[in-house]
Amino acid sequence: MITRILPQLVKQFFSRIATNPFPARHMPPSLTEALTGPGASINPPVPVGPRFRGRLNYDRSKCIGCRLCVRVCPANATDYQPEEKKIVIHNDRCCFCAQCTEICPVKCLTMSGEYMISSYERKKNIVTDSGPLHVPEKSQA
Amino acid sequence: MSTTYTIPVGPVHVGLKEPVTAWLELEGERIVNARVRPGAIHRGIEFMARERNPIQVIYLSERICGICSFSHVMCFIRAVEDLAQIGVPIRAQYIRSLVLELERVHSHILWAGVACYTIGFDSAFHLGMLMRERVMDVLELLTGNRVNYGVATFGGVRWDVTPELEKALRGMVRYYRREFTPFRDIVMEDPVAQARMRNVGVLTRDDAVRYSAVGPTARASGLRIDLRKSSPYEAYADFEVEPVVPQDYFGKAYGDVLDRFAVRVLEVYQSLDIIEKVLDGLPEGPFVAEPNPNKVLASLKKAEGTGWGIIEAPRGDDTHIVSLKGGEDNVLWWKVRAPTYANAVSWPIMFRGNELADAPLIINSIDPCISCMERMMVTDGRERGIVTKTELVNRSRQKTLDLKSKHAAGGGVGK
């Protein structure tokens, strides 16, 4: 009914826009330049929640090579390297279930809050070592 | 002399959210018959499960469906818990019911929005999508993800409900109580929406029984069936869930698309009540029976047998049957029967006598989830032939009688 929908429309007319409107009046020659160049204003991404599961951090020096994460990973994202008795993580296969961080006996795997990880190169998504974790980025409650 | 034309709707069609083909036989604009041809989105998930252990299959079962992912997870987990006799703490059962209801809220609001889109009511569609954001935000706070929550595990849940979360959940319930009623009235009081949905795609009560409709589709036809009431699982026995049927609210069940809309919209309110009851009655205690997944895997390796899990998903009852073999890591076999599989049978009945322009609306009215539905089955090929429904009912009755006499003789149920 128009009487019920009208208050909704008025309310939405004055509410803050969360998405990004198209950045230019006409289609620019390069959309990437228009988005990253001077004068472009883009609403930043919404901050992630406290339990968000992003790209995996892997502390290679702490890893004992027990292969439990390989056993439990649903997506075969953890690859065991028999010579070094360590793993490498293929983040492009990862389904971000955090099961490996739960089963890891030495807690050398943690989930970061990072999520913009897509890349044109597969190798950029392979984590061999992200170093020891200095600050606890997030706690698995 | 009338000519019958046969036209396909799908597998790719603007009115469809997922690929399925409906071959419609038309006389003019009127549909006289329909055949539904699935098969475009089969992925072989059960086969993939056979090279994974049960913990890995939790996340695989989550990928059966994007909307009712938690229902499939719960169903699978309940089946494995059934066969391995894993107990679940009461707090975990409450949290599971909570997430199941949150999922029902978001699934039903999404469907209500999509139904408005199908009849061309785009303002209501966008309003529905706006409504749904709040429950998605709460789900993200609770589980870390908007879809595919990964929150359940064998013997409990993986993340607890903290006091801040409880506050967010209560805020969400208040928000929906306040904001959802305008959305409902906008659609249900709109004369155009009523004209598009009333007496369209009618499934009578008798047909719903005959073709085994489940979930909101059956309830819209006036059947009082709800697994949360008839065989309560998790914490539902504490809440007294009454099936939502249109005759209780409007005096008569038409079994048409508007009734299906009304049932789903009213179930949102019911789910909000259940969420509040869960929060009020959330008991203290552990939220997982065995926090070490390694020990869970070791105990599941020893487990042997077949387990069942049947729950009321947002679209109807979802059944998973899992078999494990002792000494083997991987799942031996796994059968999924999604609610759309039962509901799709009544599609041709709903189509008959309707206009061609209503075909996408009728397809969407059962809230189809084709990727849930497309399952495979491997048999040994020994038993052939078709079992009629009467025979199946008789066999089920016989089995119940056998179980009863067994329990009367043995004294006591297994679990």
Image (tube, coloured by chain):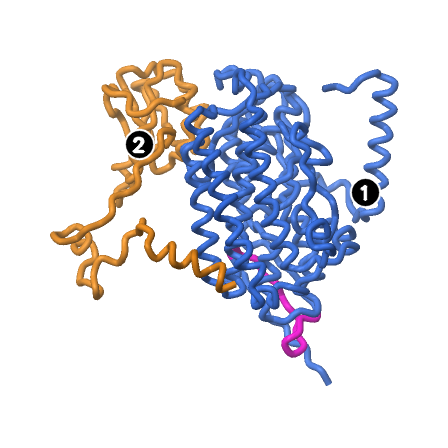
Q: Tell me where residue B26 appears, x and y as whole percent.
A: 66, 74
Question: Can residue B116 be seen in this snapshot?
Answer: yes
Q: Which residue is mark 2?
A: A113
Quarter holding the N terminus of chain B is bottom right
Whether residue B20 appears in magenta in the rendering, the answer is: yes
Q: Tell me where residue B122 appears, x and y as whole percent.
A: 46, 62
Q: Which residues are magenta?
A: B17-32
Quarter holding residue A125: top left
Determine the colour of chain B.
blue
Q: Chain of mark 2?
A: A
Q: Are marks 2 and 1 in contact (CB under 8 Å)?
A: no
A122 displayed left or right of A70 = left
Q: Tell me where residue A45 appears, x and y as whole percent.
A: 28, 43
Q: Which residue is mark 1?
A: B392
Chain that appears orange = A
* Amino acid identity at mark 2: Gly
Secondary structure under tag 1 reads helix
Quarter holding residue B313: top right
